């Protein structure tokens, strides 16, 4: 009994230490963002500032169109997430329950794209976007990223875990694939939808390389690109840089805290460990 309790306490302490190590950079970002410039430049930075201030946020918001960049990131991320979730669910259902010639080969080809680095396809993507006259628009960022091979794989694994008896019973009652998908698969796929939505939103929100290439007007930039410009002009302004970075990181942290239950359930039920 004592050995079991000691093991539990040891695992708990280890988890707390790991959590502290992982969360400390985020905590330090908050501390620097709300510290005064005098405290930061004076070398007297503490684990918690002597006086909280919002001057770093005010300085950044007055020098850059942060609200516009935030809106751009939010709009692009939401549209990409909705399209990606829709395509992934439909494709996952097709690969899970529709048998057609070449389905296995097509699925393997889709999975093989996961082994391609993004840098390899940037030149073909750029030529495709310019050929379609989308360069410099939101759609130049949205369309090339609006499908995910990993999302298709995760959806297929999740849908395969749904009891086959439910789908067979619906088919015996005369339900077609559309009705089965909308009445049975979708209601049971809420954890999967939360996982795909959050993962796509996070990836698109933090994407830097492709939006930097595809967007050319300052008012269309996203937050990661804006952070690059801020670092160029506010290189030694650590408070301003951390304030901008906190604006970029904060929404995703809050979103994860809200949907973490569905996030864990989605991975557990899809067979991913």
Image (spheres, rainbow, N blue to C red):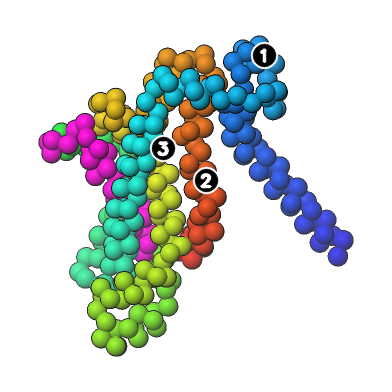
User: Is 164 inside the magenta-drawn segment?
Assistant: no
Marks 2 and 3, the one that precedes in the sequence: 3
Q: Compared with residue 181, is residue 246 higher up or lower down, i.e. above or below? A: above
Q: CA distance from mark 1 to mark 3?
A: 31 Å
Nearer to the camera, 235 or 128: 235
The residue drawn where x is 34% and y is 56% is: 85
In front of the other: label 2 or label 1? 2
Q: Which residues are magenta?
A: 131-156
Q: Residues within 10 Å of mark 2 (few under 14, many from 20)?
A: few
Q: Secondary structure at mark 3?
A: helix
> Residue at horizontal 33%, vertical 42%?
75
Front residue of 98/185: it is: 185
Q: Horizontal and vertical percent for residue 6?
A: 83, 56
Q: Write down the quadrant of residue 4 in the picture.
A: bottom right
Q: Residue sitting at 52 percent across and 16 percent down?
A: 237
- Where does the image place residue 25, in percent across and percent down from the top left? 60, 32
Instruction: Nearest to the eye among marks 1 and 3: give it.
Output: 1
Q: Residue reaching furthest bottom? A: 173
Horizontal side of residue 224 vs 12, given as left or right: left
Please name the predominant secondary structure of the magenta segment in the image. helix
- According to the image, label 3 marks what residue? 206
Q: For the N terminus, which image quadrant?
A: bottom right
- Asked if the stretch drawn in magenta spans residue 147, the answer is yes
User: In terms of secondary structure, where does tag 2 sit?
Assistant: helix
């Amino acid at each position: 009994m004592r050995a079991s309790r000691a093991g539990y306490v040891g695992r708990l302490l280890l988890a707390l230490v790991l959590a502290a190590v992982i969360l400390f950079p985020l905590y330090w970002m908050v501390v620097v963002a709300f510290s005064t410039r005098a405290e930061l430049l004076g070398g007297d930075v503490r684990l918690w500032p002597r006086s909280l201030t919002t001057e770093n946020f005010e300085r950044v918001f007055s020098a850059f169109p942060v609200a516009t960049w935030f809106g751009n990131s939010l709009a692009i991320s939401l549209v990409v997430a909705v399209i990606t979730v829709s395509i992934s669910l439909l494709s996952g259902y097709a690969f899970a329950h529709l048998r057609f010639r070449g389905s296995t080969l097509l699925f393997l080809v889709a999975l093989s794209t996961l082994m391609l680095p993004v840098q390899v396809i940037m030149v073909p993507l750029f030529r495709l976007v310019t050929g379609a006259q989308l360069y410099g628009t939101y759609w130049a960022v949205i369309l090339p990223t609006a499908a995910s091979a990993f999302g298709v794989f995760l959806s297929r694994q999740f849908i395969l875990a749904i009891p086959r008896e439910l789908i067979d019973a619906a088919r015996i009652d005369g339900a077609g694939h559309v009705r089965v998908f909308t009445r049975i698969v979708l209601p049971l796929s809420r954890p999967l939808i939360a996982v795909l939505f959050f993962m796509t939103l996070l990836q698109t929100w933090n994407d830097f390389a492709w939006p930097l290439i595809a967007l050319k007007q300052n008012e269309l930039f996203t937050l990661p690109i804006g952070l690059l410009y801020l670092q160029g002009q506010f290189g030694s302004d650590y408070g301003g840089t951390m304030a901008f970075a906190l604006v970029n990181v904060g929404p995703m942290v809050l979103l994860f805290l809200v949907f973490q239950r569905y996030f864990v359930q989605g991975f557990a039920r899809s067979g991913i460990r």
